[in-house]
Amino acid sequence: MNSYQKNKISIEGVTKSFEDLLIVDDVSISLKEKEFVSILGPSGSGKSTIFNIISGLMKPDTGKVYIEGKEFTGKTGRVSYMYQKDLLLPWKKIIDNVSIPLVIKGETMQDARKKVKKYFEIFGLEGFEDKYPHQLSGGMRQRASLLRTYMFSKDIILLDEPFGGLDAITKSKMQSWLLEILDKLEASIFFITHDIEEAIYLSDRIYILSDRPAVVKEEIKINLPKPRHEDIVTTHEFNEIKKHILNLL
Ligand SMILES: Nc1ncnc2c1ncn2[C@@H]1O[C@H](COP(=O)(O)OP(=O)(O)OP(=O)(O)O)[C@@H](O)[C@H]1O
């Protein structure tokens, strides 16, 4: 990553309280083009609130949200956002679940199906277009949710603990898969997690948040070589970063 890259997202001086309880305190963070940036912090520290503000679902009390340099504070519809519990509709086939964002944007079901179909291979879902969510494994359902999110807006994506509900083995497979397809997606991704190893393994940069109210404690650049493989988690460099983060939290 170099300093000439454009900001896809930047939030500046964002503060948010709920009923006099300060949750987010003067947070300024950014995401550059094609970057993968994690927001790592304790449970309940205000991470999802920051995503709600970036996506425009919530207005900050103070501060501003910019997307590609334009002000977007309180405006929805520009970035993809996958919630922690983003469920597929059980009564719809996978292809129709994934088509929803395009249909909401006004495309016919037929056109939407055609457009999403070409991404089934990248997302490891080829051949499962006409299955229902309960016929897929947990990892596949999560990939289908990710694809649905990606179809809303392909260039800027917010992922709120997308692998949080998966067992350790599936989670590790999903992380490796995500790293493999990142180049093809050509997206800039903000990723919420409270899993330190996940954040180091996947990210170009990590913002470490404090306990509530969330303030940015440190911004860490992850200079581990790419492409990254699973065994990187056993290296000295990886463990040094992990130790540093553990000391901060
Ligand atoms: N709409 C709301 N009204 C009142 N309080 C809220 C609201 N949204 C969030 N909170 C409170 O703000 C705090 C931060 O919540 P948030 O979901 O942003 O944290 P988080 O870091 O994403 O947590 P987790 O990792 O557990 O999902 C919590 O104490 C929560 O109860």
Image (cartoon, rainbow, N blue to C red):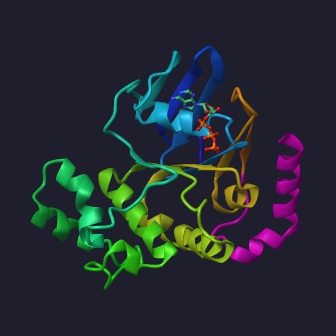
Q: Is residue 236 magenta?
A: yes
Name which quarter of the figure residue 76 lies in. top left
Residue 214 lies, with reference to residue 123, above or below; the image says above
Residue at (53, 68) in percent of width and height = 178
Residue at (13, 54) in percent of width and height = 107
Q: Quadrant of the C terminus?
A: top right
As rendered, which of 138 and 198 lies closer to the eye? 138
Left or right: 175, with 207 as reference point: left
Left or right: 152, with 65 as reference point: left
- The residue segment tinted magenta is 222-249
Residue 41 picture location, percent across and down: 71, 42
As rendered, which of 167 and 105 lies closer to the eye? 167
Residue 162 picture location, percent across and down: 54, 58
Among all residues in the image, which is located at the extreme bottom?
127
Ligand 1 is found in the corner quadrant, namely top right
Name which quarter of the figure residue 120 lies in. bottom left
Residue 207 picture location, percent across and down: 68, 41
As rendered, which of 13 and 7 lies closer to the eye? 13
Q: Main secondary structure of the magenta part?
A: helix
Residue 116 lies, with reference to residue 150, above or below; the image says below
Residue 221 lies, with reference to residue 217, above or below; the image says below
Q: Visible in this render: residue 85?
A: yes
Left or right: 195, with 60 as reference point: right
Residue 139 picture location, percent across and down: 51, 73
Left or right: 103, with 2 as reference point: left
